Image: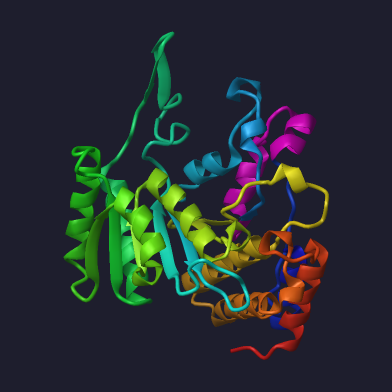
Amino acid sequence: MRTALEALDARFGLGLDLVQRDIGLAALEAEGTTLPGDVVESARAADGVILGPVSTYEYPPPEEGGRNPSAEIRKRLDLYANIRPSRGRPGVPALAPDMDLVIVRENTEGFYADRNMFSGPGEFRPTEDVALAIRKITVAASRRIAEVAFGLARRRRNSVTVVHKANVLKVSDGLFLSEVRKSAQGYPDVALDEILVDAMAAMLVRQPGNYDVVLTTNMYGDILSDEASELAGGLGLAASVNAGDGHAVAQAVHGSAPDIAGKGIANPAALMLSAGMLLEWLGARRDAAGLTAAAKHLEGAVDAVLADPANHTPDLGGSATTERFADAVAKAIAEREPG
């Protein structure tokens, strides 16, 4: 990913200053915590952040330093919108090559116990044989994520599909759905469809090309975006950006894949495409045409490299290494014409 960004910087003169900070297990060993406090403050001060994959399942309990960097950074920087595109790409085998959608996932509340409480986790055991989880849905969070989805749809194909389970979760999903409908009134040019989450999981398989912007709550969006990514070619291509009003963090959808760590065969495309989304966010926020053009050029370079099966990493059925893929993208950045 760094190879691609350095090539992009050289091509477009972006003036990027790439600063690397350790989090996760390396930070735990060095500093006793998976997320040092000064890293969060560095992230807050930066123009943008690229967050590498983390192995949260391997972390010790929070009281022993095992803090989830992804969840904490999202919460501390109020990154309420998780934008996860999925589309078929030329040359990549896919179960749904005609898919071209973006899942807009509320990122700060819902069923996720590590981010929906002011103090303490949102799940607990009142007795030895009972475990409870609290779901948090608010008017403010529902309204602002709906605005993101409708605004994005206006820049795409003017269609939003809201995914819910209000037939069962009548209060919490009912509140979310109500706020989405209210926001829709301000976008008469954008069509709004509603679908139950279990039906959506099936329809992504049956009719993947029918969807444009998919709006939903935290857990549904996490699950459906993984499904969509696999249908469109695999998690190795699954990019995302976590955005708020003042900060954004690029983050590949996939995890750390410890089974292939150190083998040099991981697919870097998802993290490259996520970095491109971050540049696009910065370009829009600053009205900086150079950043926007660079983001588009990066995605075009990745697509050009993916179009040749010789560049496919093992997750795509090929034998290329991470380094070979990165070098090919850097070469494409340098040689392809922008536009």
Q: Looking at the image, can residue 258 be seen?
A: yes
Residue drawn at (67%, 34%), measured in percent from left and top?
34
Which span is picked out in magenta?
24-49
Nearest the viewer among 225 and 203 is 203
Tell me the quadrant of the picture where the N terminus can be found: bottom right
| 26 relative position to 251: left or right | right
Percent position of residue 311, x then y = 75, 72
Residue 299 x/y as whole percent: 61, 75
- Quadrant in the picture for residue 215: bottom left
Question: In this view of the protein, which residue sits in the foreground, 181 or 162?
Answer: 162
State how the image is colored.
Answer: rainbow
Asked if 114 appears above or below 153 in the picture, the reply is above
Residue 22 shows in this picture? no
Residue 132 left/right relative to 11: left
Expressed as whole percent of the image width and height from the top left, the position of residue 105 reads 40, 53
Is 251 in the magenta?
Answer: no
Residue located 58% across and 89% down the image: 339
Task: Please determine whether, in this image, residue 199 is positioned above or below residue 131.
Answer: below
Q: Would residue 272 appear left or right of 280 to someone viewing this image?
A: right
Residue 147 lies left or right of residue 13; in this view the side is left
